[in-house]
Image (cartoon, rainbow, N blue to C red):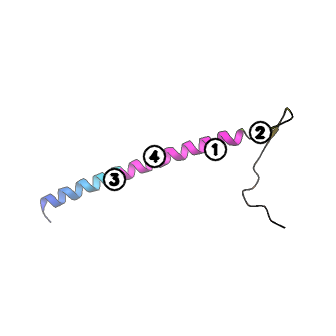
């Protein structure tokens, strides 16, 4: 393998490593933002019924059984 090929391989490896690091960083930032937003939304699940503020809680994500 020639000198140019080795240099090119090194540049490509560095570029790929930087791309992967950036992807990982963005994924982590997105996950933190998503978790924060979900926490905010879960705290504010209240229903206003005739002037009364009734707390609402999601118990299960499964579908309700059909009869």
Q: Residues within 10 Å of mark 2 (few under 14, many from 20)?
A: some
- Mark sitting earlier along the chain (2/1): 1
Q: Taking 50 as reference, is 38 above or below it?
A: below
- Magenta stretch contains residue 38: yes
The N terminus lies in which quarter of the figure? bottom left
Residue at mark 4: 26
- Percent x, y for residue 32? 55, 44
- Mark sitting earlier along the chain (3/2): 3
Q: Which disc is residue 38 wearing?
A: 1
Q: Is residue 66 left or right of residue 12?
A: right
Label 2: element kind: strand
Q: Main secondary structure of the magenta part?
A: helix
Q: Which disc is residue 46 wearing?
A: 2
Residue at the (75%, 56%) spot, across then down = 60
Q: Are the residues tagged 1 and 4 within 8 Å (C-beta)? A: no
- Percent x, y for residue 15? 29, 52
Spatial CA span between label 3 and label 4: 14 Å
Q: Taking 51 as reference, is 8 above or below it?
A: below
- Mark sitting earlier along the chain (2/4): 4
Label 1: element kind: helix
Label 3: element kind: helix
- Magenta stretch contains residue 34: yes
Instruction: Please report the bounds of the magenta region as a residue range.
Output: 19-43
Nearest-to-viewer mark from 3 and 1 = 1
Nearest-to-viewer mark from 3 and 2 = 2
- Mark sitting earlier along the chain (3/1): 3
């Amino acid at each position: 393998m020639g000198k140019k090929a080795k240099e090119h391989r090194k540049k490509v490896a560095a570029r790929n490593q930087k791309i992967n690091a950036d992807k990982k960083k963005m994924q982590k930032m997105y996950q933190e933002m998503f978790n924060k937003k979900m926490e905010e939304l879960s705290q504010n699940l209240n229903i206003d019924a005739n002037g009364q503020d009734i707390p609402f809680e999601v118990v299960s994500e499964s579908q309700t059984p059909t009869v």
